[in-house]
Structures are given as C-alpha cells and as structure tokens.
Image (cartoon, coloured by chain):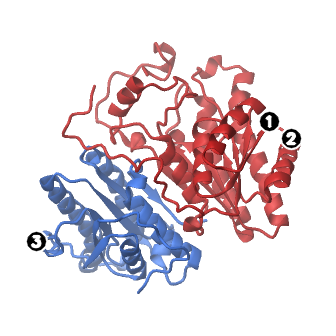
Amino acid sequence: MAATQLIALPAWLEGRRALAVGEGAALDAVAAALETAGARAVRGAAVADLPEVAAQFDAAGPVDLLVHAGTPLPTISSEQIGMEQWRATFSADLDGRFLHAAEFTRRLLAADMPGNILYLMPPYRVEAGQGMAGTAHGALDNLVKSLSVEWARDGIRVNAIASRVVADYQGSTEPQQTSLTSLAAYLLSDYAAYVTGTITGIDEV
Amino acid sequence: MTIPPHHKVVEAPPVDRPPLPAGTLNGEVAVVTGGGSGMGLAMASAFVQAGAKVAIFGRTQEKADQGAEKLRAMGGQVLAVGADVRDPAKIADVFDRAEAELGPVTILANNAGGNYPVLAEGMSAGQWRSITRIAIDGTFFCSTEFARRRIAAGGRGAIVNNSAQYIWTGFPGDAHSAAAKAAIATMSATQAQDWKQHRIRVNCVAAGFFPHAHSVNGQNADQDVRLGAMLPIARVGRMHEFGWISAFLCSPFAAGITGETLVIDAADRLRRTLTSPDFIPPREREVIWGDM
C-alpha cells in the first residue's frame, strides 16, 4: 500500500538502497516512504535462519539501509505458550532481527561502507497477554543500544521506533502515520548522523 | 588521541542543505528562549531556514540582539527581546510583543538554561536556583503561557524543549542541571498529555556534546577533536544538526509526534566497558566533571 504522507518527503535518501524485512501496514508505509525519499527499497520476509537471511541479502544486492519489522507476536497469556509456539513467534522475531543486523553489518564491513539500521517495533505495554512482546521489547531495546556502540566506528547507526503506530498503523491518525514514515526516513538519513542507540515513539501518551 | 583512519566518521549534510524544504514553516511564528547564542540560536536558525518568523527571548536585550543580527543576515523576520523567563508577568509581556509584531506564536523552543560544575555540598541556594529556576520554572512558565494562548486561539502548536543526554544517569558534580534537565523531559511528557486535546504537541531533544562559544569550556578545534575521540560516533555534534532535529519535531513531518524525548548524543550515554579507570569521587578530582 502507498504511504499516507500529509506532506511530501524530500529526497533525504537519494541513492540509498534498503532491505525492508517483515510484513504489515507500518512496514509497507515505511518502505513506500523510503522510495519517495529517493531510496530503492527491496522487501524481504522475516526469516530467522542464517542461510535464509544470507540468501535474502544475496538476492537484494548491495544495501546500506536495513529496516526490520520483525514477526507479529500474538496476545496470549504466558502459561499457554508451548515451546513450539515460542520458537515460531518470539524466537523468530528476536533471532531474525539479530541475524539480519549481523549479516547486514558483515557485508558492509566487507565492502568498507557505512550504513544504517532501523527496527520497527510495538510499544512497551505492561498488559495481560503481552508476555512475548514485553520480553522482546527489553531484548531489542538493549540490542539497539549495544549494537550502536559496537558499530559506531564503522559508520553504522542502529535505532528503533517503538510505537503503537507500528502495532496498529491502520488505526492511527494520518498525522501519526505521516510521522512514522517521516521519522523513519529522517533517522535513516545522514541528517540523523549524530543519532544512534535510540528508541523513540510517535505518540505513546 | 586521534581517530584512526580506518574508523568512519559520518557528518550530517552541510548547514546550507537543511532537511526541511524552504517554506515548510511559512506562516509559523517561533519563540526561542535563550535564542541569542549557542543551541538556542541553532534552533532559531533552523526555524528561519524553514520559513518561520522568530522571536528571540534573550537573557538580556544585547544577547538577543546579537542572535537576531545573525538570523536577519539569513533573511529571517526576527524580533529580539530581553526576557527573564523566571518571571511569568514578564513572559506574558514579551509574548504580547512577539504576537503584536510577528503574529500568533505557534512554536515554542524552550532552550534558556545554564550550567557549570559545582559540588552539591558546596552549592549555595543561589547557585541551585540559578539553574533550576531558569530551566525548570522558565520552561514551565513559557510553556503554560504558550499553551493558554494556543488554546484561546483554537488550539494547534508545537513545543520543543532542550534537555540533555545525562537525564537517565544523573551527572555527579552537576546536581542542579541534572535535576533540571530530567524535570524538563518528564514535564514534556505530562504536558503532552495535558494539551493533546488542544493539538499542542510537546517533545524534547536530549543532546550530547555540542560545543559552542558559550559552553562551559568554550569551543576550539583542538578540544573538539579531543572530545570527538571519546565518543562512539567519533566527533562532537554540529550545532546545525541539533537545530534541524528540533525544527523537524515542530514541523508537519512530525505532526503526530508528541510526548517523546529524541536523543541526539552519538551514543555517548551508552559507552560502557566492564572495567573503567579507578573511580575518583567528584570532590577529589582535579576537575569536577573530569578533564576536558
């Protein structure tokens, strides 16, 4: 679907190449916005197996932007989650986000190129049934902070947008939708060259 | 220490290539407190680049005039006034002046503040108040004056507050500013909630090292290189990138963003190793904040 964009995005990402991993309306909108901002965006499935991740990068060709929206996590009370479901959802989400980021960086290091990573994730909500999302949020929050420092001197920034606009894009207002896509493009651009290791929301009040 | 040549140092685009297209803020009037120099002037410059008219509230008329001169050279329509942001009556007066000369104020950048190292047990009541009352009270009084006017006008507006990257860790030897900057961030989130129904957005920028002429240790190229070498991103912040991200938060691109604190610190707050140099209490250091 096309991004809802109340104001046209400038060419902040002219010449950049992005791999946008995952599914959902928020990622669709962000991927479309990256194209509007001048990037070429290739889509990839949220796989969590390293050979599959590598194959996805092989198919995409050189990219210097990675947007990862993870795997949808169900609302379910924790005692009802068995190992099979845990592996298929929580592990797939967290492992996939890490494996994609690590493979992205290995390729940039080999090519001696800078790049940027942006995770899209739901907000942190202390609510019944959010055991998987809550656990994933903590892991991703500190993953962003750790990777940002590890890779800072390689010119690779790592940030996240954690928002209910990501979780419920269709139910968000047009200004919120515009803000998600604009903030994503801004963070991925060199205008945010001094921003790394951050987790920002849109309207979580 | 210098930056090894194989480390990548990425700069933001140069100051004459702002992210917001010219005219993005046409028709808007921005008040910038402490806008005569430093980070406030960077915010004001970004607003002017995007087409807003700007009222600088400076600590003194002279300081405000100095900033206004630079903004006018950029083509900005600017008003410069001296204002004590600790005085609500004075704030109302200067808002009146700004609105009479430039039109309804629709953007507020709360930047007025100060900072200097001092040990808490040796801090006088006057020193404590010199920082907290400008930063906390000033932000509160200016924001509430702005909000009352915007609500009376039918709503809509944007506030951006200047916070700091040490709001999550505290800052030993800087109790007054550490308390004040964190208060500003939590104030922002709560006021965002208060005024959401009026379409008044409130956000914060938590900045790291952005040396300028009025920083505690001033600014010079050698010091910038030395400070940059200690940061993961390998450089100090450029004033225009701080101004730009502040203007972005007040722009239509961020029309749905409220209650957020956006960190722009080169991951300074995240530097950590399992071991560190021996801990020296601030009282026993040669320089309270550490060698600059």
Residue B145 drawn above or below residue B233: below
Task: Kindly identify which numbered label has been placed on residue A51.
Answer: 3
Label 2 neighbourhood size at 10 Å, few (<14), some (14-19), many (20+)? Answer: some
Residue B52 drawn above or below residue A92: above
Q: The residue under label 2 is which amino acid type?
A: Lys
Q: Chain B: give its colour.
A: red
Q: Is B272 situated left or right of B48 in this image?
A: left
Q: Circles 2 and 3: CB distance less than 8 Å?
A: no
Q: Is A165 situated left or right of B146 in this image?
A: left
On what subunit does the disc labeled 3 rest?
A
Q: Position of residue A185 (x, y in %)?
A: 42, 65
Q: Is B100 situated left or right of B205 in this image?
A: right
Q: Chain A: give its colour.
A: blue
Residue at 86% across, 53% down:
B100
Residue marked by disc 1: B84
Say what secondary structure mark 1 lies in.
loop
Q: The residue under label 3 is which amino acid type?
A: Pro
| Residues beneath discs 1 and 2 located on the same chain | yes
Residue B207 drawn above or below residue A181: above
- Residue A123 visible to an observer of this rendering: no
